[in-house]
Image (tube, grey):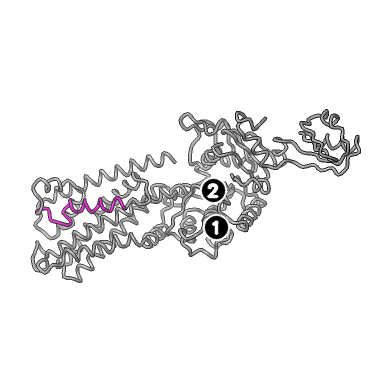
Amino acid sequence: MNTTSAVRLAGVTKTFGSVRAVDALDLTIEPGEVVAFLGPNGAGKTTTVDMLLGLSRPTSGTVEVFGGDARRAVALGRVAAVMQTGGLLKDFTIRETVELTASLFRPARPVDEVLERAGIADIGDRLVGKASGGQQQRLRFAMALLPDPALLVLDEPTTGMDVQGRRDFWSAIRDDAERGRTTLFATHYLEEADAYADRIVLVRRGQVVADGSAAQVKAMAAGRTVRATWPGADSRALAALDGVDGVDVRGDSVVVHGSDSDTIARFLLTNTPATDLEITSRNLEDAFVALTADPAEGVLA
Amino acid sequence: MSTTTVTTDRRVPPLGGFSGRLLGLELRRLLRNRRAVIFTLVMPSVFFLLFGTDGDYKSDRVGAGNWTAWIMVSMAVYGAMIATTSGGAMVATERAVGWSRQLRLTPLNPVAYIAVKALVAMTMGLAAVVAVFVVGSLVGADLPLWRLLLCGAIAWVCSLVFAAFGLFMGYLLPSENVMQILGPGLAILSFAGGLFVPLSQFSDVFATIAKLTPAYGVGELARAPFGGEDDLALAALNVVAWGVVFVLGAAWRMSKDTQRV
C-alpha cells in the first residue's frame, strides 16, 4: 500500500476541439504530500483536476488514483473534493445537505463531527440560500470530509472566507496532512501556497513548468538578491562572479542579483570589507509571473 | 480521531445510493418550496371550487356520480400532472446550479438519482390527488367510494407519464425556472385534453386533435369508473404512447448528460 502513489498522471493530454488544455502532463503525488497546483487562468488546472476526479477522461495518457480508476476512487470515498463548480441547493439546510451526502458514503464520518471541523456546527439549521459565500465554502469542505478521504482535492478552497475562516481552514488541512492525508489544492492566493504547501507545481499551457518546494520554485525563477554595506564597492568584480545577472550600487549599499547567492555571499564576506549582509529570495508571486508568463509577451526576458 | 490511511473496508452504498433517508430529505426540501406547494396542492382545489361547485353540477348526474365529482377527478388529474411534472423537472434546477456535478463526487448512481426524482414526483402527485378529493368530498362531490378510490388510483398511476415528461423537459431545458415555461404549457395541455372543458364542447376538428394530446388519455381513464365511456381503448393507447415518448426522450437526454460527465 505504501508503494502506491496517491496520484499518477502520465502523458495526460486533453483536447477540446483544437485547444490543447492539458498537454502531455506528467505528475506523481505521493501519499501525505500537500501540493499546491498553481498556474494562470486557462493553464489547464481545472481540466487536470476534473480528470483526477473522473469528471472527464483524458484524450490520451493515464490517470491513476491510488493505483486505480478515478471514478472508482471517488465512489469509494478515497478521493473527495471541494469544487468551485459544485453547486449547492438553496432549499436544503446546511445540516440536511451534509446528511444527504453522508447517506451516500460507506463508511461516513458523523455529521456533527464534520460540521464541527468545518466550523459550521452552530449554523446547521440555516438554509443554504441564506448562508454567506464563506459559509457555503465551509459546507463544501464539510461534505468533502465525510468519506474521510485519503486524497483531498481543493479548487480555490478559501474563496469567500474571511481571514479567520481561512486560518481555521488551513489549520484543519495541516492537521489532517500530518496524519497522512494527501492534499492537492489550486489557489489564487499565492501566499497560501507559499505558507501551506510542501510542494508547488506550476503549470502553464497544460504543462508543468516548475515543481519543487516553495523556496526551490522561487529560486528557479529569479535567483536571489544579496544586499551588503560596502562603500566604494567594486561592481566589476561582483559582475564577474558566476551566475550574477545584475549589480546595483546605491550609495554605501550594493545589491547583487544572481542565481547562486552562496557564491556571491562567500565572495563578499571573504574577499571584501562588506558588512550587514542580507539574502532575500524574490517572492512566489515574482516567480509565478516569471515562470508562467507567455515568452511572446516579453515578460520572461 | 480518524486515521487517514487507505482503509480497506470502503464500499459503495447499496442500491446505488438509493435510500429512505435520501427520499425523505428530498421530500422535505420540496415541501419547503412554497411555490411548488401552492401550485400542486392549492391551485387545483381552487380551480375545482371555481368551476365545479355550481348548483346544477351537484344535481346533474353523469354515469354513477354527479358533475361536481366528474370535475373533481379532472382537477385531480390536472394537479397530479403539475405535481409530477415539477417533480421530474427538479433535475433542471439541480443541473443549472451545479448540484448534479456535486453529486458526481459521491457514489450516487444516476439510476438511483432518477428513481428518487420519480418517487418524489409520484409522492407529490398522490398528495395533489388526495388534496382535491378531500376538498371535493367536503363540498358535495358524489360518487360511490370504490369508484372514487379507483378514479384516484388511475389518476395517480397515469401521472407517471408526466413524471417522465418532467424529467425529459428537465434534461432538455437546463434552466432554474423551468416550471415558468412548463406551468402555462401544462395548462394548455389540460385544456386541450378536456380537463377544464369537456371535449363535447369542442368542434369536431378540435375534438379529434384533442384526443392526440397527452392529457386526454389520463383524464379519460381516470374518469372511466363513472361508467358510460366508450373510447377507453383509444385513451389507453394515448397514455401508453405518450408514456413511451417521454420515457425514451428522458432516457435519451439523460444518457447525453452522463456521457459528458
- Report the amino acid beneath label 2: Ala
Residue A177: give x, y in percent of width and height: 65, 50
**Circle on res. A109:** 1
Q: Going from the N terminus, do you reach mark 1 or mark 2 first?
A: 2
The subunit letter for the residue under badge 2 reads A
Amino acid marked by disc 1: Arg
Q: Is residue A211 left or right of residue B117?
A: right
Region rendered in magenta: B180-200
| In-image side of B59 versus A172 (left or right) | left
Q: Image point 61% across, 55% down: which residue?
A: A166
Quadrant of the image occupied by residue A270: top right
Magenta segment main secondary structure: helix
**Is residue B120 toward the left or the right of residue B156 in the image?**
right
Disc assigned to residue A71: none
Residue A187 in which image quadrant? top right
Q: Residue at x 26, y 62 (%)?
A: B43
Q: Dot 1 lies on which element?
A: loop
